Image (spheres, coloured by chain):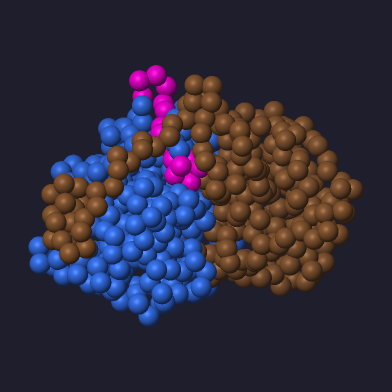
Amino acid sequence: MSALAFIELDEGTIKKSSLEAITYASAVEADVIAIAFGALNDGEADKVGAAGAKKLLHVTDEKLSTGNIMAYSSAIAEAMISEGASLLVLAKSSLGDPVAARVSIKIGASLLTNIVELPDTDAGFKVKNSIYTGKAFAITESKEEKKILVIKKNAIEIKEDGGTATVEVFTPTIAESDFKVKVTSRDKTEGVVLLPEADIVVSGGRGLKGPENWAMIEELARTLGAATGCSKPVSDMDWRPHHEHVGQTGVKVSPSLYVAVGISGAIQHLAGVNSSKYILVVNKDPEAPFFKAADYGVVGDAFDVIPKLTEAIKAQQ
Amino acid sequence: MKILVCITHVPDTTSRISFTDGDTKFDKTGVSFIIGPYDDYSLARAVELKEQTGGSITVINVGEAETEPTIRKALAIGADDAIRVNAYPIDALFVAKQIAKVAKEGAYDLILMGRESIDFNGGQVHGMVGELLGIPSVSPVMKLDIDGTSAKIAREIEGGKEYMELALPFVAGCQEPIAEWKIPNMRGIMSARTKPLNVVDPTSDEAATDVSKFELPPAKSGVKLIDADNLGELVNLLKNEAKVI
């Protein structure tokens, strides 16, 4: 049997989370076909093969280059049928989530989401998925032959020695009714690491006292190649944009390293970060609850520690 | 305008999560249940839209009898009537099919819900309902304005926002800051007692997935504290012990 992996692009570059989806699919099924929409930068198709796909279906139709959820869903459902694929793997994202939901109805597949590791296929097909906003896991079984899996960041390490994927232009038949939503504009921060894609996240809280003090957070993030995040009060006070809010009602992250600066560690914030592999907490209050959830901690004033930490990292790079 | 608001009945955000019966059931002991925080935003926006354009708000929940106090709270906040589909919400597909059936029969102009429930965090139901009804679904919606039969929406994407226009009807999964949560007032609470809450039977549809067991994350082994004057050691640990930088 074969599997389809949905590839998302950011300015023509394949998102790392999508490469994780390819590798995940290749660990479940031998034949993996990737599908991407819109112009690809030079060399990107090579990554698709290296991550484990044998074929790349490239949708080049200009009308389908803008993240149209309904049209993408129709195209993916069509590709699954024409390729005889019984499995679809996608990375969790603002595009992947709705596409997965719509495709599941179109093809009658079970939909398993927030998956954190490879499935258990010993008896049936079971996945481990994150629930209660990171406070617990469920072992969920698929009752359908066709399955759609939405994986969380870091569910698998990207393969780099897969091989070469053949590239095929794919022209799906899309009905006019799939163009009911008109995207008028996008307002997106350029040139930064996107929060859900980041291997390292550096977040600031109220302890930073004001938005004017974020330069040192940004500098530390730049040094680490990290994304910047923040706590809910910081986003509520408009010190930082809402899309940086990490926590129960914001973005849930699962990076390799989460650095929390001046964040006390309320249960709602911890819920959004506790799937991180390692957590480093910098706080001047030794009683801050966040230390209990941390792997590494520095008790000290962020205004003193953060610039010094940035210098120490630079010195060892 | 006829608005359908779908709400979940979920543990309070500060709840400690634990399981019973050999880790096969959620332990409700000492847990208080609330309207899903994201659903609460969608309900608040529905109340504002009704104030602007008139119409009605029906709230729907797929759940057993224990969810009725949560439904009554939604009525106190401003919904006109409620429907409870009398079934345990097994999975997203099961819930979506229940909502789609009610939505189709009621011919609603707008179907609002939270971006995801805070128990299973799937964020799948709005997309499934949209597809089942053959109408658009948009999530997570931060801004929603209606003008006649068309809508302007701001949706959060990674690193920013996407602005879009579309015609009614559609499904929206909502999040902050679409509206401020509304606290029910005494008049609302009194009137909620007599507003209609209709209990209907579920469709015969089956779920596509089944949870066999729950697990709690392994406890952290304890924090390693590093002196603020010895940050070179911290960098060394991150590099050579954790291997993350």
Start-end of magenta stretch: A121-135
Query: Compared with residue B94, is residue B178 higher up or lower down, i.e. above or below?
Result: below
The residue positioned 39% from the left and 68% from the top of the image is A207
In this view, the residue in front, A294 or A99, is A294
User: Is A311 in the magenta?
Assistant: no
Query: Compared with residue B12, is residue A14 higher up or lower down, i.e. above or below?
Result: below
From the viewer's perspective, is B6 left or right of A286? Answer: right
User: Is A126 in the magenta?
Assistant: yes
Q: Is residue B168 visible?
A: no
From the viewer's perspective, is B89 left or right of A309? Answer: right
Q: Which corner quadrant of the image does residue B101 belong to?
A: top right
Q: Is residue A281 visible?
A: yes
The outermost residue toward the right is: B194
The outermost residue toward the top is: A123
Q: Quadrant of the N terminus of chain B?
A: bottom right
The outermost residue toward the left is: A316
Supply the letter of whichever chain is brown: B
The residue positioned 56% from the left and 49% from the top of the image is B13
The residue positioned 60% from the left and 58% from the top of the image is B174
Q: Position of residue B95 (x, y in %)?
A: 64, 39
In this view, the residue in front, A59 or A223, is A223
Q: Position of residue A46 (x, y in %)?
A: 20, 52
From the viewer's perspective, is A280 left or right of B114? Answer: left
Q: Colour of chain A?
A: blue
